[in-house]
Image (cartoon, rainbow, N blue to C red):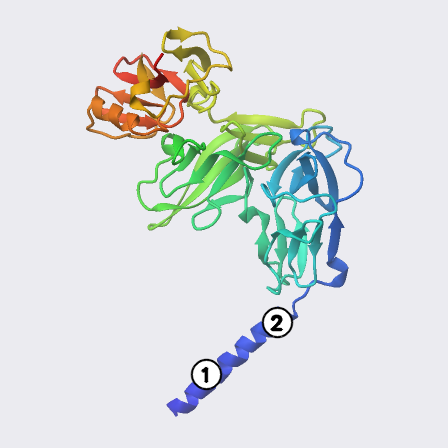
Amino acid sequence: MASSYSIYSTSLLLLLSFQLFSTISEAIVPASDTFTYVNEGDFGDYIVEYDANYRALPPFNNPFQLCFYNTTPNAFTLALRMGTVRSEALMRWVWEANRGNPVRENATLTFGTDGNLILADSDGRIAWQTNTANKGVVGFQVLPTGNMVLHDGKGNFIWQSFDSPTDTLLVGQSLKSGGASKLVSRASAMNNVDGAYSLVMEPKQLAMYYKSPNSPRPMLYWSSAEWFTIDKGSLANLTLTSVPDTDEGFLYYLVFDYFTKNPSSNQNRYMAYSRYNNTLSYLRLGIDGNLRFYTYNPNVQGVAWELVYTFLDRGSMEGECQLPEKCGKFGLCENNQCVACPTPNGLIGWSRECEAKVASCKASEFGYYKLEGVDHFMIKYTRGDGGRKESDCESKCSKDCKCMGYFYHTSDSRCWIAYDLKTLTKNGNSTHLAYIKAPKK
């Protein structure tokens, strides 16, 4: 009897598996819904972010439209644009498929009956794809939230652009543990590759990092510790949401909803507000490493965009001096202003030309000059090496060719090695010392 039951169960399982496979394999995109768009023809007439050239494609859902755009000749990015012609305001790029891997004129975007969305260069090279061939996809949509999706016959998302953010998080979009857990800045307005800055969702916090070719690892310059603390468990995901104030009736808040696991909990942090519906908003990690909330009001002409909140700003909890490149390659910052250029001969007036001299690797050919009451941008959010003598800190820097200086707190014997100097902050505490490496005369 047991043997017959086992045979029956196995047969039923095989039948169900076959039916499921057949259902998926038979789910194809109707030929009428397939497309191939070619990157060719005239450019659009309206002003878009980064002063780019663009070609708008048919996929559209107000105020989002799919486009090819470029900021350097013959190097195109497939992207979603936010904004409408009617508002007469700048249109901005809120999602990109192939940053750092551009395509050329006559590149193609193809959605075939197998359900795969493919961006191919003019020579046939595949630059980007959704990898959704024969996975049950029956349709393609750009949703009014700005989420571009491939869905099955029941409306379930097989692929969505919300799962692969670049430098922007739209309302309803999340950072996820085990998935897309960070935003990465753009290098410059002209150069569309990954920049030096990242916003990372970590187990206990959101954190912003600066990474340059000279630094062996990213340097922390901001964390969310002052906004929310994860005492127990770890962050599973964080979602940007828009919440109306039902009491006031005319206020809408931008909120971080964040979920933790082990143990499970759901909390939120109210970040900013507007006096109109702000569901068309986004969080952007800028080229300068700052975080900003922007809101789009399609009912306002000319001034449809509002900068709602800037994270590192003279009016926020953290000032502009915390931005690594606030004072360019080198400079002393105080009260949100670049006030001086430190040199071996003392402080002089700051300008964009202020730069620390690169020292030789030979210890006999360089020395250090001292600054009192000065911190590096990484010091506020990192503990450095504790229990070190000042001479040990100097020795560590001197033995490392890439070290540009070291920072030492005499009050608690803490040491920080700096591979980039950038912006130093004046703090008035004479126990906070900076030693800048410089060539001997």
| Residue in the foreground of this view, choosing between 399 and 41 | 399
User: The N terminus appears in which quarter of the rendering?
Assistant: bottom left
Q: Position of residue 96 (x, y in %)?
A: 61, 42
Asked if residue 155 is positioned above or below residue 170 in the image, the reply reads: below
Q: List the residue tagged with mark 1.
A: 9
Q: Position of residue 402 (x, y in %)?
A: 37, 29
Q: Position of residue 266 (x, y in %)?
A: 41, 45
Does residue 246 appear in the picture of this structure? no
Left or right: residue 347 compared with residue 188: left
Q: Which residue is pictured at 42% across the width and 87% down the height?
A: 5
Tag of residue 191: none
Q: Secondary structure at mark 2?
A: helix
The amino acid marked with disc number 1 is: Ser
Q: List the residue tagged with mark 2.
A: 23
Tally the numbered discs: 2
Asked if residue 147 is positioned above or below residue 131 in the image, the reply reads: above
The residue sitting at the bottom extreme is: 1
The amino acid marked with disc number 2 is: Thr
Q: Position of residue 77 (x, y in %)?
A: 65, 41
| Residue in the foreground of this view, choosing between 351 and 209 | 351
Q: CA distance from mark 1 to mark 2?
A: 21 Å
Left or right: residue 179 compared with residue 219: right
User: The C terminus appears in which quarter of the rendering?
Assistant: top left
| Residue in the foreground of this view, choosing between 349 and 358 | 358
Asked if residue 295 is positioned above or below residue 128 in the image, the reply reads: above
Q: Residues within 10 Å of mark 1 (few under 14, many from 20)?
A: few
Q: Which residue is pictured at 47% across the width and 86% down the height?
A: 8
- Classify residue 343 by image quadrant: top left
Q: Which residue is pictured at 77% across the width and 36% down the height?
A: 43
Q: Which residue is pictured at 43% across the width and 91% down the height?
A: 4
